[in-house]
Image (cartoon, rainbow, N blue to C red):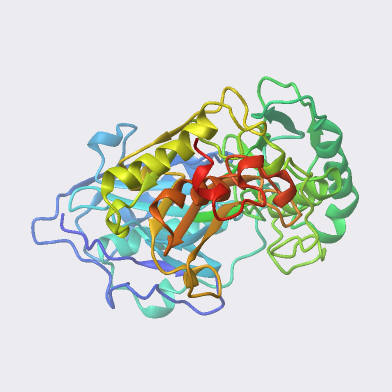
């Protein structure tokens, strides 16, 4: 049997529609249509009472159609032997990438082949409505040329009440806690506080009501709250997120385990706000919907727990050793003389001569520019300060991981030196390295050799 692999679907609206990539006519069998069509019925995480019987009655009703078709539908439990697969699912809002705000009653999947057609049917309606949907989907499958009014789908009756929430077969939904970070911080009270909030608010704001039971140490749970260091993906999106959860609602069936991810590092008050927001998604609430400002797309006053600044750390970089790259081609002096100067500056910090550098911190030279934490070059210093004369400047880049304006870690330092005698190059490099490797926050914390040095001292500091 040759069946079109284009989408043929029906949306949940008063008037019948098809998705944009649907054919104008129903798919037709070829002249070599087999007399027997084997079909199978499966369900995706939904248990409609007697759903197999309902669907079999709908499919096999076509065996009695007085339209001259020579097809005979025969039920089989062997999916590999079946030509036609009816899959009973939850709410169908995506049909082969075609998304609508309401829902499709059914969708012929693009992975269908000539001898293996897959149709997913919304299973969130009453049994009589599901039977009608399956009948129409089957008619489209065999290319039945019925009058238009016979194939129209009228507005269906109310959805089956037992399928209004994501866990239709559970009287309680267990929530546990997974802590993937080190430390002794108490997370359970924060989760419980957010669940208490929604327990009181679900009747007013939730798309459904649910009996969530918080058991932090439960081995098996329906919902897991995961406290993690960093969230860089949420669904199909990538970025920097502070929380992530599935968006559920009426007719959307839950995954076997729903994961609510929460990024750590925020104050208790902000963490509770993040939890309330993510459980709002579980309750079907979208950004911009009530309750506001909980469901705002961003938490305006999100406050991080203060962390040590880079200047307060024994290693202000995340890497050890700290690697220094010198662009020798940017200096006019002989390469060996330039190398001597900068190696002395690196050795000063690597050997622990600076009281601000921990003994376990290593500083070394590298030939790999991309691997370096510090890059030294000779060039135009107006790139980092408003001057054209001889001198030097340093620019540090880093990560700010709390709510202040200081870096918690440095990621890169660029040191530019211009118009300086060769025998003073090391001094200039050492001066600027004091503000990163040496953790100096101002001139008063710079090591003695680099503080208030005159012209001659900048050349004699290595002796």
Residue name at image x 83 percent, y 53 percent: 202
Residue ranking furthest to the left: 32
Rendered location of residue 389, percent (x, y): 49, 72
Rendered location of residue 64, percent (x, y): 33, 55
Relative to 137, residue 18 above or below: below
Left or right of 317? Residue 264 is: right
Left or right of 123? Residue 249 is: right
Relative to 288, residue 460 above or below: above
Residue ranking furthest to the front: 456
Quarter of the picture containing the N terminus is bottom left
Residue 228 image-quadrant placement = top right
Residue name at image x 39 percent, y 72 percent: 19
Rendered location of residue 207, percent (x, y): 74, 58
Residue 42 image-quadrant placement = top left
Tell me if I can see residue 412 in this picture: no
Number of labels in the image equals: 0
Judge by depth and name the residue closer to the eye, 207 or 379. Answer: 379
Relative to 17, residue 333 above or below: above
Tell me if I can see residue 377 in this picture: yes
Relative to 272, residue 353 above or below: above
Judge by depth and name the residue closer to the eye, 289 or 229. Answer: 229
Residue name at image x 29 percent, y 63 percent: 66
Judge by depth and name the residue closer to the eye, 182 or 258. Answer: 182
Judge by depth and name the residue closer to the eye, 215 or 189. Answer: 189
Residue name at image x 51 percent, y 52 percent: 428
Residue ranking furthest to the right: 200
Rendered location of residue 69, percent (x, y): 22, 61
């Amino acid at each position: 049997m040759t069946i079109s692999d284009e989408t043929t679907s029906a949306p949940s609206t008063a008037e019948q529609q098809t998705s944009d990539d649907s054919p104008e006519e129903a798919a037709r069998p070829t002249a070599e249509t087999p007399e027997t069509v084997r079909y199978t019925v499966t369900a995706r995480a939904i248990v409609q009472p007697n759903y197999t019987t309902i669907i079999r009655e709908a499919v096999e009703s076509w065996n009695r159609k007085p339209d001259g078709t020579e097809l005979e539908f025969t039920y089989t439990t062997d999916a590999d032997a079946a030509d036609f697969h009816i899959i009973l699912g939850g709410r169908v809002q995506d049909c082969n990438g075609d998304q609508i705000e309401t829902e499709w009653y059914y969708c012929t999947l693009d992975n269908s082949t000539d001898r293996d057609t897959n149709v997913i049917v919304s299973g969130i309606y009453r049994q009589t409505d599901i039977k009608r949907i399956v009948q129409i989907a089957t008619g489209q499958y065999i290319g039945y040329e019925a009058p238009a009014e016979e194939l129209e789908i009228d507005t269906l009756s109310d959805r089956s009440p037992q399928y209004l929430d994501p866990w239709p077969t559970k009287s309680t939904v267990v929530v546990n806690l997974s802590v993937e970070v080190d430390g002794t911080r108490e997370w359970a009270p924060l989760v419980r506080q957010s669940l208490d909030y929604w327990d009181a608010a679900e009747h007013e704001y939730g798309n459904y009501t649910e009996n969530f039971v918080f058991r932090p140490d439960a081995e098996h749970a329906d919902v897991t709250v995961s406290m993690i260091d960093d969230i860089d993906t949420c669904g199909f999106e990538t970025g920097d997120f502070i929380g992530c959860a599935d968006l559920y609602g009426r007719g959307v069936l839950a995954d076997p385990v729903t994961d609510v991810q929460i990024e750590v590092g925020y104050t208790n008050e902000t963490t509770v706000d993040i939890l309330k927001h993510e459980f709002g998604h579980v309750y079907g609430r979208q950004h911009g919907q009530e309750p506001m400002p909980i469901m705002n797309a961003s938490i305006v006053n999100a406050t991080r727990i203060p962390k040590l600044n880079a200047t307060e750390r024994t290693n202000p970089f995340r890497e050890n050793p700290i690697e220094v790259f010198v662009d020798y081609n940017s200096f006019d002096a002989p390469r060996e003389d330039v190398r001597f100067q900068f190696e002395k500056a690196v050795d000063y910090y690597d050997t622990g001569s600076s009281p601000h550098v921990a003994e376990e911190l290593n500083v070394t030279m590298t030939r790999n520019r991309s691997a370096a934490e510090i890059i030294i070059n000779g060039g135009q210093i107006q790139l980092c300060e408003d001057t054209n004369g001889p001198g030097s400047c340093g620019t540090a880049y880093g990560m700010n991981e709390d709510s202040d304006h200081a870096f918690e870690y440095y990621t890169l330092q660029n040191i530019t030196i211009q118009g300086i005698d060769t025998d003073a190059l090391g001094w200039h490099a050492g001066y600027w390295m004091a503000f990163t490797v040496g953790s100096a926050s101002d001139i008063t914390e710079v090591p003695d050799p680099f503080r208030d040095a005159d012209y001659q001292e900048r050349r004699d500091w290595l002796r």
